[in-house]
Amino acid sequence: MSNRIYNILFHTHTVSGLVISVALYVIFFAGSISFFRDDIIAWERNQTVAPGTQMNTDYDQILDSLEAGHGSLYGRNINIRQPHQERNIMVSMEPSMDSAATEVQLKSVFTYIDSSTYEETNYFSSYTLGEFIYRLHFFAQIPYPYGYLMSGFVAFFFLFAIITGVIVHWKKIISNFYVFRPWAKLKTVWTDAHTALGLIGLPFQFVFAVTGAVLMIGTTVMLAPASSLIYKNDREHMYRELMEQPAPQRFQNLPISGNLSLNMLIEEASSYWTHSNLSRVVVQNYGDASMRVIVEARPNPDHAFAGLGRAIFDASGDLIRITEEDNLSYVVGADQTIHRLHFGDFGGHGLRIIFFTFGIISCFVILSGVLIWVEARDKRSNAQWKRRANLWVASIFMAVSLSMYPVIALSFSFIKIFKDATNPMPHLMIYKFFFITWLVVSLMLGIRRDHFFTTRFCLISGALLGFMVPIVNGLVTGNWMWETWQDGRIQIFVVDVFWSITSVITLFIGAIMKAPDY
C-alpha cells in the first residue's frame, strides 16, 4: 500500500470516528443497557412475564374491552401484537368502514391493554425508563425522522471507521493484538487498548453497524425510490407485498350474525405449530361478511432462528390457508435475521450478557480512539491555543459520554421512588430528570477538564448509585433479590443483580485507578 493511500485511509478512519464519537458512544451505551429493556420494564412495573408468554391472554375479553371503550368495532381492521416480553399488548385499530359509523368509530386507535387485568392505557401513560433508554439509543427523542436518520447515518459512518481501521492496521493486526504496554506513555497505552479491544469486538461492531444502518435508514432512504417509482408512494401496499401479508378483502357492509371466538381460532391455529409462540393476531373488516382473521406465530429460538407460521380464517371460522412455522420467504427471513442479530433476542439472558459485554467494549474502543487523537496532538510543537482547544473537545466528549453511567443509575432509583402510577404523562418527568441531570453533570465535569477525575468520578459515583438500585427497590416494593429469585420473578431479579455486579466491577476499577504521570 502506498503512503498516499495509507494516509487517506488513516485520516478517513480518524475523521469518521471523531465526527460521530459522542453520538456513537450514546448509541452503544444506551443500546447495551437496552438488551435488558423488557427486564427493566418488568422491574419498574413490578410485573414479570415468562419468555414467550406475553401473548397468552383472553382475546375475546380484549375485544369486549375495546368495544366498551371505543364503541362498536364493526368494519374496523384490528392489529394485536407484542414483540416484547411484557404484559401490555399493543392494539391498533383503523377507522371503521361502516357507512353508518359514528364520529368515535371513524377515529384511528393505538392503545395498550394489560393481558392480565385488561386495563387500557395509552403509549404516554405507560411510558417507562426502559422504553426511554431503548429509544435513546436511536435518538427517538429527537423529532421524527431526524433522530432516526441521525442514528442510521452514525451507524453507516461507523461502518466506514471499522473498514478503514481494519485496512490501516491490517499488516500488524495480529502482532499488535498481543502487545499491551500499561507502563508506557499514555498514547501507547490507548493505542494498545484500542487495537486489542477493537479486534475482539470487531465482528460484533460490524454486525451492529450494518443492522443499525439498515433498520434506521433502510426504510426511509433505501426503500424510498422503490416506494415512489414502483408503488406510487403507496408504502402500505409495498410493505404488504414485501412481507407477504394478505391483502384486506373488499368491505361488503353486510354484518354477520353472532361473533366468532378469537380464542377458538387461535387455539385451532396453534395446534398446527408445535414449537412456536403466538406473535400477532389481525382481524380485517371486523363483523362483516368479508371478515378475515389472521393468526401468526414465530418459532422458538431453540427450534429455528427465523420463521413465520400464518393461519387465515374466513367470517364463518373456516380455515382458508395455513403455512408452517419454519416456512418463510427471502425478504421475511432477511428482515427477521436483521432484527434477531441486532436485538440479541434469540438466546436468553446469557446471550444478552454477552452482547452487553461487547457493547461496553465498543464504548471503550470509542473512548480510547478519541484519547489517542488528543494525546497525539498534545505536543510542544503545536500552538498553545490548538492544544487547549483539543483538550476542551476531549473534555466535553469524556464528560458527556462517561456521565451517562451515574445519571442512568440515579434515574432507576428516582423512577422507583417518585413515579406516580396515576401520572398521565410520565415521559415528561423522565425527560426532564434525565436530560437536566445529564446536562448539569456534563457541564461540571467538562469545565474541570481533567480526564482522570472525570473517569474516576463517573465510575465510583455510578457504582455507588448502582448499589442503591436493588436497595431502593427492596425498600419501596419489598422485592429483595433473594425473594425474587425464590419466587421465580427472574426479570426483576436480573435488574437488581445487573446493577449489583456492574457496581462491584466499576467500583473496583475506580478504586485502583492511579493518576497518570505526565
Image: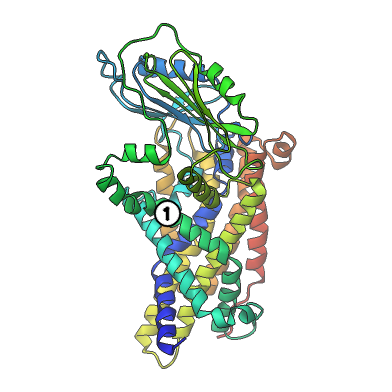
Q: How is the image coloured?
A: rainbow
Q: Residue at x 42, y 54 (%)?
A: 214
Q: Quadrant of residue 254?
A: top left
Q: Residue at x 61, y 74 (%)?
A: 196
Question: Horizontal and vertical percent for residue 508?
Answer: 67, 64
Is residue 461 visible to the viewer in this orientation of the structure?
A: no
Is residue 328 visible to the viewer in this orientation of the structure?
A: yes
Task: Determine the secondary structure under disc 1.
Answer: helix
Q: In the displayed structure, would residue 208 be above or below residue 450? A: above
Question: Horizontal and vertical percent for residue 161?
Answer: 45, 70
Question: Horizontal and vertical percent for residue 275?
Answer: 64, 34
* Number of on-image labels: 1
Q: Is residue 97 left or right of residue 377?
A: left
Question: Horizontal and vertical percent for residue 199?
Answer: 59, 71
Q: Is residue 248 left or right of residue 512?
A: left
Identify the residue position indicated by label 1 in the image: 214
Q: Nearer the viewer, residue 323 or 397?
A: 323
Neighbour class for label 1 at 10 Å: few (<14), some, many (≥20)?
A: many
Q: Residue at x 44, y 7 (%)?
A: 258
> Tag 1: residue type?
Val
Q: Nearer the viewer, residue 171 or 150?
A: 171
Q: Nearer the viewer, residue 137 or 4?
A: 4
Q: In the displayed structure, would residue 81 be above or below residue 415? A: above
Q: Is residue 212 left or right of residue 200?
A: left
Q: In the displayed structure, would residue 333 be above or below residue 255? A: below
Image quadrant occupied by the C terminus: bottom right
Q: Quadrant of residue 117?
A: top right
Q: In the displayed structure, would residue 187 be above or below residue 353? A: below
- Name the outermost residue toward the bottom: 381
